Amino acid sequence: RAKLQLAMWKCLSYCITVSMGVYTLAQDTWWSQPELYFKGYPHLTTSTMKIYYNIGFGNYAYQLYTLFHEPKQSDFWAMFTHHICTLVVMGVSYFTSFTRIGTVILLLHDFADPIMEFAKCWLYCKNQRMADVFFGLFAATFLVTRNYIFPFHVISACIPYGVYEDGERMPRGYAQYFWICVSCLCLLQVLNLNWGYLICKMVYRTVTAGKVGEDIRDADVE
């Protein structure tokens, strides 16, 4: 029962965050063209972006806090590193006006999460078929958003496009903040690859067993 309640709460919070992210990006068309993430920098941070950033920052700060008060999983330190890197990227990108790419990064890292929690809800409710369906949807969404779009359309856009016409790195005079963000993004991608591997293991186990089982990270660690 406790696991079901936690999954339902996380599913609701992620749905709110993702909905706000989709609404924010739907206000314009630049999000589909990586070369426009930096064009015309610095950009105006819209009111919807500010709201989305506040919701996202609060969500990850809350997750970082609750990480120490929930049953410890085998990827505890990976989650801790993920939350710290995400908060750093959000904070730095907000105050340096890299909010276009920051908004895309936040949405990509949240998009699969409500599907995962929804799959857990069905599993805890003993509805195996629906758990299998939503786990498959989660796995596909995670691998596409975090292990394809994020590295090949977001991180890859930072180096070639994050410069002014004269070749100086953005923001002018404070390039160290750019490299802090890029370093955090690369670390996030390493974590994404690790979780992608774990998801593929779960997919293999699901196919061979005929049903999805417990989260392979759920084993408590000392």
Image (spheres, rainbow, N blue to C red):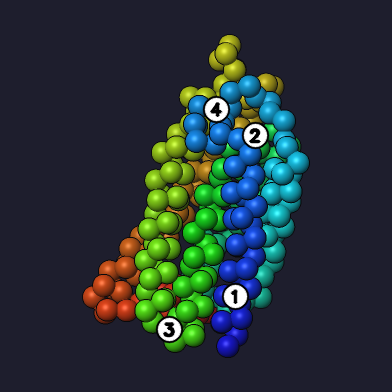
Position in image of residue 129 (x %, y %)? 37, 79
Tell me if mark 1 has few (under 14), some (14-19) or many (20+) residues whose alpha carbon lies within 10 angstroms of its own. Answer: some
Residue type (three-letter) at the residue carrying disc 2 = Phe
Residue 98 found in image quarter: top right
Q: Residue at x 48, y 67 (%)?
A: 116
Residue type (three-letter) at the residue carrying disc 4 = Leu
Distance from the alpha carbon under mark 3 to that under mark 1: 15 Å
Give the label, 3 or 4, closer to the camera. 3
Residue type (three-letter) at the residue carrying disc 1 = Met
Which residue, given by chain and number where applicable, does mark 4 sit on? 36
Residue 160 position (above or below residue 87): above
Q: Are marks 2 and 4 in contact (CB under 8 Å)?
A: no
Which residue, given by chain and number where applicable, does mark 2 sit on? 98
Give the label, 3 or 2, closer to the camera. 3
- First reached walking from the N terminus: tag 1 or tag 2: 1
Residue 31 position (above or below residue 144): above
Tell me the element at label 3. loop
Distance from the alpha carbon under mark 4 to that under mark 1: 37 Å
Give the label, 3 or 1, closer to the camera. 3
Distance from the alpha carbon under mark 1 to that under mark 2: 33 Å
Which residue, given by chain and number where applicable, does mark 3 sit on? 127
- State the mark number for residue 8: 1
- First reached walking from the N terminus: tag 2 or tag 4: 4
Tell me the element at label 2. loop
- First reached walking from the N terminus: tag 3 or tag 1: 1
- First reached walking from the N terminus: tag 4 or tag 1: 1
Tell me if mark 3 has few (under 14), some (14-19) or many (20+) residues whose alpha carbon lies within 10 angstroms of its own. Answer: few
Position in image of residue 105 (x %, y %)? 56, 45
